[in-house]
Each structure stands twice: as structure tokens, then as C-alpha cells.
Image (spheres, rainbow, N blue to C red):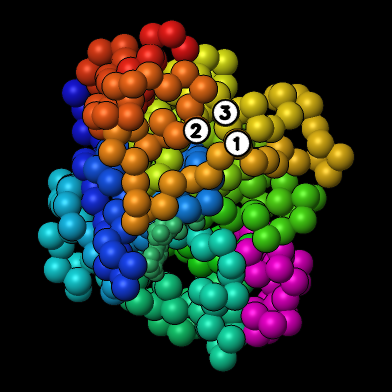
């Protein structure tokens, strides 16, 4: 088997709080190939962001990565000294966050913030980095980039700020771009433009994209493969066609039922995740067996007793897995 661009193997991240230990990411495994767009979907609280932040090693106390391997370019990122990790972060693996204001510094011009990426990671001087910043703003289609480069984040609209984030994330031609709900805060037209921009820039730099979203429409448009998460666990991994046309896990099916059918659009033009009956279990009080058992229409006695192992579908290396005893009935 060839080497994956990124391989996550039984990653575990916990939060120790006054309520107890929450396993936000529970033995999560998946891999990503060069140039691939991989989607992670799941309801709010299913562990998507914590998974991404773990890969970036940006988990802060009371959170901690307690298990697993994050393989990237022959290294386990978990074991990399922080100094070397700083060279990976933003340079070889970069991340776009949901709310750009939290990751842009309000005290510096956007030009200075993009230039900083070139100075820090590529050793450019002030002048060169300034030119490249204007070029990056132009590339993410910010009008009058040489004027905008001197503006502060608060002078830009939400969509513009998200473009600046993309410009920063792509400045050093990363091998992996992680986009955590990159368009959730944006309105529909801007959302479409931002996604289009990401796809086009991806073509240019051949990066792998990990796109995290609760919006299945975004997944259908962007991703080749999909990881479905529930209560901190991977419940299904498959190519986008199988996930949409022949979902194996009852949670994946419930997710799909909760949105308008593909091709159909809601009044707002978006595929929005609506409520699935029942509640996501509390991470402090997970069911003993399958986490989805309390909401599952096909639940059997054994599902409530024993945890469900992940089953490999289509043989080892296919990258398709499902965590359900009834997968073959799907
Ligand atoms: P999402 O799938 O919506 O991105 P997250 O990955 O952000 O979900 O969070 C998953 C779970 O991890 C949360 O429901 C919460 O229980 C726990 N968690 C995340 N961040 C923290 C934190 N800073 N402190 C305590 N628990 C946290
Ligand atoms: Mg999140």
C-alpha cells in the first residue's frame, strides 16, 4: 500500500472538566491522499473541530491528546518537538477557522499578517513579503489589493476576512489545508464564492483539503470521500457516491434524511442539517454499547450491550469502514 498524505490512527483526545472526562475524539482513524478533498460531517459536538485541532496540535488544557498516531511525511506529529511542529503548522499544514475574527489579529494590517507567513516560513525580507501579500490578496480576488493590504481586519466584510484567512492559509503552498466550517458564518452567495475559490486554489497547489462541515451540500460539492462522526467516533467512511447513494450506517441515513434530496434546494438555497429525532448523548455519560443505539430505528439488544467495532468494507485499503452490526442490511 502506498503512503498516505495524512494517516490518523486511533486518535484519542479528552477533556478533563469538573463534570468528568469527556472523550471528544475516540479512537478516530482515517487517511487522506494527495490532492484529495476529504469531508468530515456530523452534528454539532461530534468531535470534528477537536479532531482538526488535534492534527494541528492546537489542543489546549483541559484538553489533551491521549492516544493514537498522526502520520505525516514519515513522522508522527504527536512526537514532533514543538519547534518542528511550528514549521509544519501554517506552512505544510494550514487551517482556516470558522470565525476569521478569532484568528486574525485586530492590531495588525492584513498585509502584515500575510507577510508574516512568508517571513517566518520562507525567510523573505519585508519588501518581498509585502509584494507576495498583495499577490495573495489578488489571488483570492480581493479588489484593489495594494490598497487593501494596508487595512485592518475590522475594515473588511466577513466574506473578505474569510478570503484573507484563505490567503494566509495558502501563502506557503501547504500540502494540507484544513477548513473548519469555512463558510458557516457567510451568506449563501459569498459561501459559494469561497468554496469555488478553495477548489481553484487547490488545483493550483495540489493540496489535500480536509473540509469540516455540518452542511451535506458542501460535502457533495467539494469532497471525494467522507468521514461521518458521531459522539466522538467515526461511524462511517466512504466515497461520496456510496455515502449519498448507499449509506451503511443508520446515522448517515438519518443525516441524509434530514436534508432536502440532492438537487433539491431549500428556500435559502442551502442544504441545512435539521434535527434528527432524539439527542446526541452526553460525552460524560455515553451508552455502554453503540453510541447511536438510543436513537437508532433498527436497534437490537446486543447493540445496547457491547461497543461496535469498525468493519472494513471492500477489503483492507479500500478506506471504507462502518461501525454498525447491520451494515450489510444498509
Ligand atoms: P464539533 O463536531 O461541533 O466541531 P467539537 O469537536 O468542537 O465538536 O467538540 C466535541 C466535544 O468536545 C464537545 O461537545 C465538548 O464536549 C468537548 N469539548 C470541546 N472543546 C472543549 C473544551 N474547551 N472544554 C471542554 N470540553 C470541550
Ligand atoms: Mg466545530
Q: Which residue is mark 3?
A: 254
- First of labels 2, 1 by sequence position: 1
Magenta segment range? 136-162
SS of the residue under disc 2: helix
Q: Which residue is mark 2?
A: 295
Residue 126: in sight, yes or no? yes
Q: Which percent across, then down, holds residue 295?
A: 50, 33
Q: Which percent across, then down, holds residue 170?
A: 49, 59
Cβ atoms at labels 3 and 1 below 8 Å apart? yes
Label 1 C-beta lies within 8 Å of the nearest ligand 1 atom: no
Label 3 C-beta lies within 8 Å of the nearest ligand 1 atom: no
Cβ atoms at labels 2 and 3 below 8 Å apart? yes
Residue farthest bottom in this picture: 107
**Side of 70 relative to 155 (left or right):** left
Q: Nearer the viewer, residue 330 or 302?
A: 302
SS of the residue under disc 1: loop
Cα distance, mark 2 to mark 1?
7 Å
Mark identifier at residue 176: none
Cα distance, mark 3 to mark 1?
9 Å
Q: Which residue is mark 1?
A: 277
Amino acid at each position: 500500500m502506498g503512503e498516505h498524505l495524512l494517516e490518523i490512527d486511533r486518535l484519542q483526545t479528552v477533556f478533563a472538566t469538573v463534570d468528568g472526562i469527556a472523550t471528544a475524539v475516540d479512537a478516530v482513524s482515517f487517511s487522506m491522499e494527495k490532492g484529495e478533498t476529504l469531508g468530515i460531517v456530523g452534528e454539532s459536538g461530534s468531535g470534528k473541530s477537536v479532531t482538526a485541532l488535534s492534527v494541528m496540535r492546537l489542543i489546549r488544557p483541559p484538553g489533551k491528546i491521549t492516544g493514537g498516531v498522526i502520520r505525516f511525511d514519515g513522522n508522527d506529529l504527536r512526537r514532533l518537538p514543538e519547534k518542528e511542529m511550528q514549521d509544519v503548522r501554517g506552512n505544510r499544514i494550514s487551517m482556516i477557522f470558522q470565525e476569521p475574527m478569532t484568528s486574525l489579529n485586530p492590531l495588525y494590517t492584513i498585509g502584515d499578517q500575510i507577510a508574516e507567513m512568508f517571513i517566518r516560513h520562507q525567510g523573505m525580507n519585508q519588501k518581498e513579503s509585502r509584494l507576495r501579500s498583495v499577490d495573495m490578496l489578488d489571488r483570492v480576488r480581493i479588489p484593489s489589493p495594494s490598497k487593501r493590504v494596508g487595512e485592518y481586519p475590522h475594515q473588511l466584510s466577513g466574506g473578505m476576512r474569510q478570503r484573507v484567512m484563505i490567503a494566509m492559509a495558502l501563502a506557503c503552498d501547504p500540502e494540507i489545508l484544513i477548513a473548519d466550517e469555512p463558510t458557516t458564518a457567510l451568506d449563501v452567495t459569498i459561501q459559494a464564492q469561497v468554496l469555488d475559490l478553495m477548489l481553484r486554489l487547490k488545483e493550483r497547489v495540489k493540496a489535500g483539503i480536509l473540509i469540516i462541515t455540518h452542511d451535506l451540500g458542501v460535502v457533495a460539492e467539494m469532497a471525494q470521500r467522507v468521514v461521518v462522526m458521531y459522539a466522538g467516533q467515526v461511524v462511517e467512511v466512504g466515497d461520496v457516491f456510496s455515502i449519498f447513494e448507499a449509506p451503511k450506517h443508520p446515522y448517515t441515513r438519518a443525516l441524509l434524511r434530514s436534508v432536502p434530496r440532492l438537487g433539491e434546494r431549500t428556500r435559502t438555497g442551502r442544504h441545512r442539517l435539521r434535527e434528527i429525532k432524539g439527542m446526541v448523548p452526553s460525552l460524560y455519560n455515553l451508552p455502554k454499547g453503540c453510541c447511536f443505539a438510543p436513537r437508532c430505528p433498527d436497534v437490537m439488544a446486543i447493540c445496547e450491550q457491547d461497543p461496535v467495532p469498525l468493519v472494513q468494507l471492500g477489503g483492507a485499503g479500500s478506506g471504507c469502514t462502518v461501525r454498525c452490526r447491520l451494515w450489510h442490511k444498509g
